[in-house]
Image: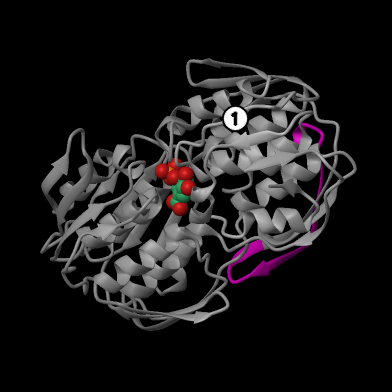
Amino acid sequence: MTSARGKALTGRLHVPGDKSISHRSLILGALAVGRTRISGLLEGEDVVNTAHAMVALGARVERLGGGRWQVDGVGVGGFAAPAAALDFGNSGTGCRLVMGAVAGCPVTAIFDGDASLRKRPMQRVLDPLTRMGASIKAVGEGGRLPLTLQGAREPVPIVFEPPVASAQLKSAVLLAGLSAPGETTVVEAEATRDHTERMLRHFGAEVREEPLGAHGRRITLVGEPELAGVEVRVPADPSSAAFPLVAALIAPGSDVVVEGVMTNALRTGLFATLVEMGARLDFLERRDDGGEEIADIRARASALKGIEVPAARAPSMIDEYPILAVAAAFAEGTTVMHGLKELRVKESDRLAATADLLRVNGVAVEIVGDDLIVHGKGRAAGGGLVATHMDHRLAMSALVMGLGAENPVRVDDTAFIATSFPGFADLMRGLGADLS
Ligand code: S3P
């Protein structure tokens, strides 16, 4: 696909439901007793794979249409052994969260995924899950997929200090802890997205959170709760909203509103950063929806300036660095993004791939240690062919870049956009974007 600078982007739009909340609503719905009704579910491939896994593990999952789904759960500890391997496609979140859920049930399951997921580290999840009583029957080299996990007959609660800031890792342990007697505790040096904790409470579990140090949290789950089916409304995904919003900032004359975007503070580091860079972003109609704060976010074309982005902000914008790097290319001056080690193990090596994305489009960029440094000139030449490496966020970031660059930007593969943002190209075209 090619994107080119054209007219200003204007209009109001809705982006699909939040991916993190969508996965969790299906998994907790499957572990609850009774019926969970979900509206606004992200119907992207990643989430659909999680829905298939829940069916394979014994839950009833029905798509009612229009983003509405219902799940009839089996109860905590009630998963059945799946007849075939569980295929999570491109999704680290689906895979790791379900590993945690399976680890707390006395069943054996094979976990697999696509070529990208098969490269990603799983040992970090397997370590705490084996401490909780699960066992690994087979595993790829270096703790990679495909792997066979046997859940614990009698799961043990643990106190776990994740070696990396990862909501996936935290969530896997909490989900396994559901069927353990007593309290399972996760001690986070850096707080990560808290959707699992919020949703566990929504389904009836007792979860306590205490602040820890400057940026951390201590999270305690009381095991063996009775989870009961509930209604879940999934708000719009801030990580998807980031693409049209940054497009509006860099395409001259633009004025765009994305409606009903979740503004949970553990997810909105990108917006805080853009405001520091001088972005004209307005948060309108702030309101509460289904336990999460949401707002309509307006973005207008802006003169951006380079800034330093502290490492401590990374967990709240971990998926947003490729699109922030694009914004930084259009800023005047240097932007330094600190502490991006985890980007190397996302859907692709996102640190290297983001640098390449900018470089092939004439932007000066360096990687120094785990920092990404973009030397913005207020403009980008464009004209590059971007390799997306099976990574949806690289594909969308590159296409956004083309909307502000002097020459069209091409991407080699847009198929993976469907994992998180089905309908992306049409929504962007609806704002006036030239994508062909
Ligand atoms: C997610 C957590 C993040 C993020 C991913 C979704 C989640 O991963 O990159 O897209 O839903 O928990 P880590 O927590 O492993 O950084």
Q: Up-down: is 199 above or below 366? A: below
- Residue at 17% x, 56% y is 156
The amino acid sitting under disc 1 is: Leu
- Residue at 44% x, 31% y is 349
| Count of numbered circles in the view | 1
Q: Up-down: is 385 above or below 136? A: above
- Residue at 59% x, 40% y is 320
Q: Mark 1: which secondary structure?
A: strand
Color scheme of the displayed model = one colour
Q: In this view, does 202 lie to the left or right of 428?
A: left
Q: Where is residue 218 in the image (x, y as percent from the top left)?
A: 41, 48
Q: Position of residue 227 (x, y in %)?
A: 35, 76
**Span shown in magenta:** 275-293
As drawn, which residue projects farthest toward the right? Answer: 253
Secondary structure predominantly adopted by residues drawn in magenta:
strand
Q: Where is residue 314 in the image (x, y as percent from the top left)?
A: 54, 35
Q: Where is residue 428 in the image (x, y as percent from the top left)?
A: 72, 53
- Residue at 79% x, 55% y is 431
Please give the residue where the numbered disc 1 appears in the rendered image: 385
As drawn, which residue projects farthest toward the bottom? Answer: 34
Between residues 394 and 199, which one lies in front from this camera angle? 394
Residue 211 visible in this rendered orientation of the protein? no
- Is 416 in the magenta? no
Instruction: Assign the N terminus to one quadrant of the image.
Output: top right
